[in-house]
Amino acid sequence: MIGGTVVEHDPRTGLEDLGVRAQGEHARTTPVVGLLNGELRIRFEDNAPASTEGLEDALRSPRHEVATGVTMGPGFSFGSQQLYAATTLPSFCRLAAYKDKGTGVTGIAQNGDAPAILGDGSLAYLIHVQTRHGDSPAEKEWEFFVHGFGEQGPQLAEQLAATARTWDRNVRDGAKPVLTVHPNDTPDRLLPAGDILDKPLSRLVFQWPGRNTLLAAPTGRCDEAT
């Protein structure tokens, strides 16, 4: 799958299922950064991690919240949403509540994690909150909210919320991206239009349905493991 061969990828799965993860001599240690004495962790995939300077101070500041209006019922799969965010957002990472020290600063459940993006001493992340209760699963409902911290927190939160809404509109109902895989030395001018994700041995280009604003991938990606 190189040289521009087109394949269809099921967005319910993660990047690991693309079959292009580096192994053997090309395998790398994934950078993980701890925050608040290990209560939280940020994990970065692909290349150097983004700066986390100032994030601990940001997490001690007031939290900015944005309701996305995107709801879901029980048994929902997050795979396509997280793949969409990971391939279209700059400074994408995953924020995990690795240890619970009683602060509850993020609202992320213990041993849970959330898609996140970073700014200058700021971050925003996507979580789901139960908004409707009931005796049966069919009566229950959750909504996606974005929390932002730091000076750029509100801006990052709006960006992440807009991404969730675009995913809901264009991808959620089963739409798949077209993926092309190219040698890692392919120049940008020879790549098709799309969102670029650089791997050690290849360059991946995702063409998502309904997405007209296409971004080159940043140098850092992340995916937090609990």
Image (tube, rainbow, N blue to C red):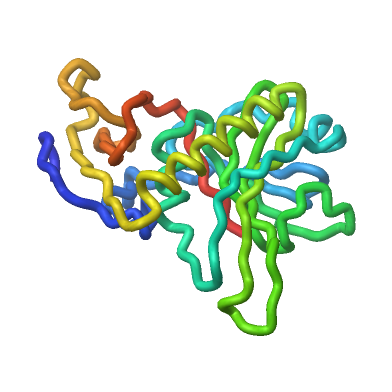
Q: Quadrant of residue 142?
A: bottom right
In the rendered image, residue 65, in percent from the top left (x then y), is placed at 73, 40
In the rendered image, residue 176, in percent from the top left (x then y), is placed at 27, 50
Q: Is residue 113 visible?
A: no
Q: Residue at x 22, y 42 (%)?
A: 179
Q: Residue at x 61, y 46 (%)?
A: 126
Q: Is residue 72 left or right of residue 172?
A: right
Q: Is residue 74 left or right of residue 106?
A: left
In the rendered image, residue 46, in percent from the top left (x then y), is placed at 43, 38
Q: Quadrant of residue 132?
A: bottom right
Q: Is residue 80 left or right of residue 205?
A: right
In the rendered image, residue 163, in percent from the top left (x then y), is placed at 49, 37
Q: Nearer the viewer, residue 30 or 115?
A: 115
Q: Nearer the viewer, residue 148 or 166?
A: 166
Q: Residue at x 70, y 61 (%)?
A: 131
Relative to 5, residue 215 above or below: above
Residue farthest right in this picture: 102
Relative to 86, residue 99 above or below: below
Q: How many marks?
A: 0
Q: Nearer the viewer, residue 138 or 226?
A: 138
Relative to 205, residue 130 above or below: below
Q: Is residue 58 left or right of residue 174?
A: right
Residue farthest top in this picture: 189
Q: Residue at x 57, y 29 (%)?
A: 50
Q: Quadrant of the C terminus?
A: bottom right
Q: Is residue 39 visible?
A: yes
